[in-house]
């Protein structure tokens, strides 16, 4: 799926923080809902989804962004995604649940 979003050129770190603040809980909720529908296969489904999300995120290509900015942004995005997945894994599959 190809899509393109035009971001204003004057975006600040605060803008990006707000974007993450919106998207991260939405991703968590979607994962929780998916896990709830999978029953005994929930853990397997979650691990497959996690691997797919990380693989696709690593393959992200941008246009019109300097390479150093792109690389730094992708590294940060991957860290945020990984942290979100790890938090979901802990919250959904820890023994205390």
Image: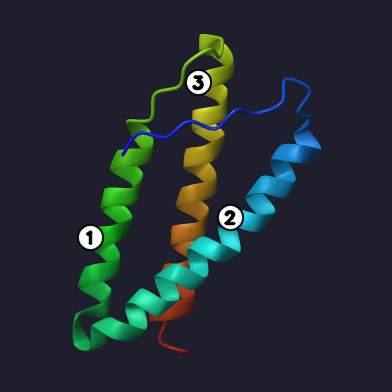
Q: In this view, does 75 lie above or below 70?
A: below
Seen from the viewer's position, the closer of residues 7 and 13 is 7
Q: To which residue does mark 1 refer?
A: 48
Residue positioned 23% across, 69% down in the render: 45
Seen from the viewer's position, the closer of residues 27 and 76 is 27
Query: Is 49 on the left-hand or right-hand side of 81?
Result: left
As measured in the structure, the alpha-carbon distance from the residue carrying label 3 to the one carrying label 1 is: 25 Å
> Residue 31: horizontal and vertical position, in percent?
41, 69
Query: CB under 8 Å between callouts 3 and 1?
Result: no
Is the residue marked by circle 1 packed among few (<14), some (14-19), or many (20+) residues within 10 Å? few
Seen from the viewer's position, the closer of residues 28 and 75 is 28
Q: Is mark 2 on a helix, strand or loop?
A: helix
Residue positioned 30% across, 68% down in the render: 46
Is the residue marked by circle 2 packed among few (<14), some (14-19), or many (20+) residues within 10 Å? few
Instruction: Report the label total.
Output: 3
Q: Is residue 32 above or below residue 28?
A: below
Q: To which residue does mark 3 refer?
A: 71
Answer with mark 3 or mark 2, whichever residue precedes in sequence: 2
> Residue 90: horizontal and vertical position, in percent?
46, 72
As measured in the structure, the alpha-carbon distance from the residue carrying label 2 to the one carrying label 1 is: 21 Å
Residue positioned 65% across, 56% down in the render: 22
Query: Is 19 on the left-hand or right-hand side of 90?
Result: right
Answer with mark 2 or mark 1, whichever residue precedes in sequence: 2
Answer with mark 3 or mark 1, whichever residue precedes in sequence: 1
Q: To which residue does mark 2 refer?
A: 23
């Amino acid at each position: 799926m190809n899509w393109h979003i035009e971001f204003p050129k004057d975006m600040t770190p605060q803008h990006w923080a707000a974007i993450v603040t919106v998207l991260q809980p939405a991703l968590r909720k979607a994962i929780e809902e998916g896990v709830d529908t999978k029953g005994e296969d929930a853990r397997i489904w979650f691990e497959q989804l996690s691997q797919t999300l990380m693989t696709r995120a690593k393959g992200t290509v941008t246009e019109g962004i300097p390479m150093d900015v792109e690389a730094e942004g992708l590294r940060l995005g991957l860290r945020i995604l990984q942290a979100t997945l790890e938090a979901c894994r802990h919250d959904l599959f820890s023994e205390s649940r």
